[in-house]
Image (spheres, rainbow, N blue to C red):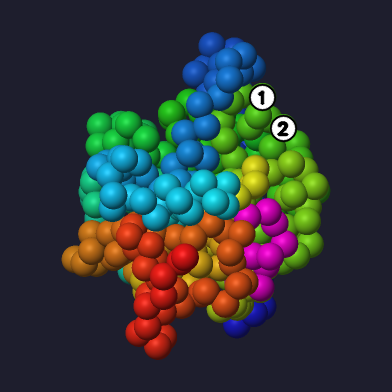
Amino acid sequence: MSRNNQEDLYGAIHRKEYEMARFKKEHQSTTDPIQIAMGYAQERQPKLRMAKALRRIYEDSDYNPDDAKWQFTKDFESQTSLPMRRGSLVVDIKRKSLSSTRPYANFDDAGLVAQAMISFGADAVFVNVDYTAYGGDLSELRNAVTAVRRASPTAAVIMKDIVVDEIQIGIAKDAGADGILLMASVLGPALPNFLDLCTTVGIEAIVEVHTKNELDSALSNLAQNLLVTNYDRITGQYFADQALKLVGLFPGTGPIVALACGGIDTPEQVRELLCAGYDGVVVGKALMGNPSAGQFIRNVRDKPLLPAEFAGWGLDDVDVNIQGTFTTTAADKTHDWQ
């Protein structure tokens, strides 16, 4: 199984390299929109729509610091100088996965799915554009950007592909995506060049890592957004606790925005990762074609969270409401903050 997965990954990389070489031949003109997208340096301060969508500070539409019900939040933040937060939920829109050729979702247009998920409350969507690996294509990315902009002024669209060539950054930029996923396991020592180009043209990058070495490489190359996956892309193996093991190796509420992904199927798993310190979680298969997707998303986003600095304090099974009552879910007990 491991050998087959290795061959699948490397086969996907070689296939993508061939596809991109052919694609570049068709888009060599200096007037080509993708070449233009890659040729212009970003001069203005970037909007950072993706990073803002992925890190949610406590924001309720009815928040009023003078209202008594928000007294706990106000006192907590004034006493600790740390903001309350809520986790972000990112939906990975795909029909199948890299590790399996069997489709598990059937839909006509990823743009319509993206609009629905954002309407349910998702903060961002991954739109997969590799047909062989994920069952998507570039036209769906453009549709998703249009649909998400219509559904929300703040939600982000991230292009997910097996990125092996810098022209793919131009493709994402030209399509209007807010971000692009770079896999450390695929790019290896080329990662800093891709990060630099993303900064130059003004598109945000999120770096997928699985091991400590990949994480260290991403951080040393000044990656601002991380996606820690439980899947080893090289072997295809699944390590259920990998994201939890790596969570202590990057700053909590510092400049690094961190997400977790890989085999996350339940709100309880999402909750555990958010309480451990992640800013958000990516869920794919569990939401694709799920009639309860809206409820799943709301259950995740409606839970107030303590600051990431409290991770590791033994509060992983604690919920806190806006009145300042901690509910220990394991023992069903309540405790007042003060």
Q: Residue at x 68, y 65 (%)?
A: 248
Residue toward you, 328 or 225: 328
Amino acid carrying label 2: it is Asp
Corner quadrant of residue 29: top right
Residue 200: which disc? 1
Residue on which the image places disc 2? 196
10 Å crowding of disc 2: few (<14), some (14-19), many (20+): some
Q: Residue at x 50, y 49 (%)?
A: 77
Decide: marks 2, 1 in contact (CB < 8 A)? yes
SS of the residue under disc 1: helix
51 vs 182, left or right, is: left
Relative to 245, is 162 above or below?
above
Residue 96 visible in this rendered orientation of the protein: no
10 Å crowding of disc 1: few (<14), some (14-19), many (20+): some
Residue 175 visible in this rendered orientation of the protein: yes
SS of the residue under disc 2: helix
Q: Residue at x 41, y 52 (%)?
A: 73
171 vs 154, left or right, is: right
Indicate yes or no whether the magenta region holds residue 158.
no
211 vs 303, left or right, is: right
Query: Where's residue 40, x and y in %?
Result: 61, 15
Q: Residue at x 78, y 52 (%)?
A: 217
Magenta segment range?
244-252
Query: Where's residue 321, x and y in %?
Result: 34, 63
